[in-house]
Amino acid sequence: MRKSADMRAVTARDADSPGAWIENSTLELIQPLEASERDDAFILAVAFTAEGESCVSLEIGFPSLGDADWVDRVETDCVASSNSWKQLAQAARGQSLVKTVRYRIVVRGGARFRDADLLAGPARANTRALRAMVATPTIDALDTALREVKARAKLASQVDWPFATAQALAAVIDGSTRRDALPGVQIILKALGDRHSWVTVLDEQGRLTANGQLVPYRAPQSRLQALSEQRVVGWLTIPLLAAMGGLEAQDYASAIQAGLAQGQDASACGFVVDLTGHEGGNMWPGLEGLGPLFGADAVVGAFKPGPPWTIYKRETDGTGLWRDDVARLPVAVLLGPKTASSGEAIAVAFSGRPQTEFFGRRTGGFATSNQNVPLGDGMVAFVMTSEMADRHGRTFPKGLAPPVEDASDEDAGLRALAWLRTQAGCH
């Protein structure tokens, strides 16, 4: 590599210490590309130590066709090292017509570099060396994610895997634990382009976290809503459920059935199922709780590809709700843009059910199924593997929309009640 002309010269310092000492310089390598290399990914990686306020950043750039300006480029933040050895990497891909790639290492202050850990070139020729720079626990977790995602993800065949792999390796280059693979796994899942695959860390009880914070449990709510002086309906508000199992999942299903029982005790002539705030999580406790509205052994949907969704009555169930007259009650389902993932799964289960109508607005468009992939140390990837289909085989790639969309959740609720007043038993 050579220094840029507009920066200070490379200096010598502590000749007996390993690595080259660089002060306030930009080191640059401009490399012409063979035709076979122009669609490749490119990587730049260094190992360095810096003192005080010093920091290092990396840049990979490509020229615009027929222009000397470097308009297509990516760069890292300027990273300090706290006087210890640190690794930094970047990956980029140019357009197929580019004929040159430029690598830059920018040093602000002073930093020492290990020559053996300097990589610059096409990913295909340097991926093995880049992998060797990553600690074993981190690379093991990343390899597990790559293997499982390639084998399971519905859109795996559409991914540029050499580039996604290079990006993921660059993101975890300085990792030392399994959890340090998290940013690399996020890159892999984002590369699928399905908008639904994601990764998180579970707490000790198996509950989801978001940005390191526990997703709080919210219980389903129920109330009675008057239709007239003589008639009432039950109103069930179903929120997201972050728990993958355990007591919270049981309590969630039980709270929904308690709301159904409240309606039955009051001779409710129908129900409103409000999914406008159901943003995802675990779909099964919601379907279990709402089971009496579908009927025992009802097939309410399916994964495509995958198994059908069958509603089973537990042998120990003593609620008295599993009756034909309950399964025939009219149900108004409220949807909205926040209705997503498992919230959409519940909506799909109601699609095609007799005596059912949808109100509100189009859902979020995440009516797809994710498989759990444990990555160790509490990390779990959720990989999109199939679409959700209703009992008639219809899928919903753009979400579920009511026949008439409402301006607000309040308007949807009012129209739902008006519809219920027209149904048999609610006059």
Image (cartoon, rainbow, N blue to C red):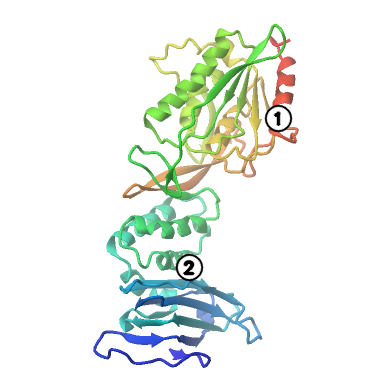
Which image quadrant is residue 392 in? top right
Disc 1 from disc 2: Cα separation: 47 Å
| Disc 2 crowd, CA 10 A, few/some/many (<14, 14-19, 20+) | many
State the residue at coordinates (62%, 78%). 71
Instruction: Evaluate if marks 1 and 2 touch, with contact meaning CB atoms under 8 Å apart.
Output: no
Q: Is residue 309 above or below residue 141?
A: above
Quadrant of the image containing the C terminus:
top right
Q: Is residue 424 left or right of residue 311?
A: right
- Counting from the top left corner in percent of width and height, residue 240 is at 51, 35
State the residue at coordinates (50%, 87%). 30
Count of marks overlaid on the render: 2
* Residue 311 visible to an observer of this rendering: no
Q: Is residue 49 left or right of residue 270?
A: left
| Disc 1 crowd, CA 10 A, few/some/many (<14, 14-19, 20+) | few
Amino acid on which disc 2 is placed: Phe
The residue at which mark 2 appears reads as: 163
State the residue at coordinates (45%, 91%). 2
At numbered mark 1, what does the secondary structure look like: helix, strand or loop?
helix
- Counting from the top left corner in percent of width and height, residue 424 is at 70, 11
- Counting from the top left corner in percent of width and height, residue 101 is at 52, 82
- Counting from the top left corner in percent of width and height, residue 330 is at 65, 17
* Residue 325 visible to an observer of this rendering: yes
Q: Is residue 158 above or below residue 365?
A: below
Amino acid on which disc 1 is placed: Glu
The residue at which mark 1 appears reads as: 410
